[in-house]
Image (cartoon, helix red, strand yellow):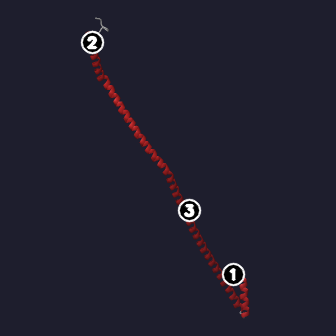
Amino acid sequence: MERLFDLDLQLLADAALMIIAVFVLFLVASYFLFNPVRELLAKRQAKIKDELDSAARDKEEASELKKQYDDKLKNIDKEAEEILSDARKRALENENKIVAEAKEEAARIIERAKAEAELEKQKAADDVKREMVVLASIMAGKVVKASIDTTVQESLVNETLKEIGESTWQS
């Protein structure tokens, strides 16, 4: 009998043995090659997942920081305005203080000038009184020398008053 592919029992046994050998070889290769590769791939997958999670957390933190900085930038204008307002208030207070001190100093100077003027006025009045005393004594001396009557005395008083001057006498 002729066979189609030369299939005999020996060929089938060899084929079965070859299949078993290939299966055993596959199991050994799987244990020594495929499992470490699978573990390596699992570790790599876990590492990538951790890196993606870390990147997501970093992105969220960066977003939060950006939000905080934006809020601070918005508040910086307000803070700057408050600082400027405070500086303006202090400058106005200093200006008012300086003006008040200048007014007080001017008032003191005016008071001092008035006091000095009053002293000068009194000094002038004292000088006029001394002159009048001197003139009165001169006049008394003239009266005594002349020993004259009232008409002569009146003429002497009038003459003395003219010498002194009316403006000095009236002030």
> SS class of the residue under badge 1?
helix
Amino acid type for the residue under numbered disc 3: Glu
Q: In the picture provided, is 94 more to the left or to the right than 141?
A: left
Quadrant assignment, res 165 = bottom right
Q: Is residue 118 above or below residue 30?
A: below
Q: Residues within 10 Å of mark 2 (few under 14, many from 20)?
A: few
Pointer 3: residues within 10 angstroms few (<14), some, or many (20+)?
few
Q: In the shown orientation, is residue 109 left or right of residue 10?
A: right
Q: Which residue is more in the foreground, 49 or 88?
A: 49
- Front residue of 133/158: it is 158
Q: For residue 64, which quarter of the picture?
A: top left
Q: Specify whether residue 148 is in view.
A: no
Residue bearing the label numbered 2: 12
Earlier sequence position, callout 2 versus callout 1? 2
Q: Nearer the viewer, mark 2 or mark 1?
A: 2
Q: Residue at x 46, y 44 (%)?
A: 66
Residue 95 is marked as 3
Query: Which circle's residue, 3 or 1, is located before the other in the chain?
Result: 3
Amino acid at the residue labelled 1: Thr
Give the residue at mark 1. Answer: 168
Cα distance, mark 2 to mark 3?
A: 117 Å
* Quarter placement of the N terminus: top left
Residue reaching furthest front? 1
Left or right: 135 as drawn, with respect to 29: right
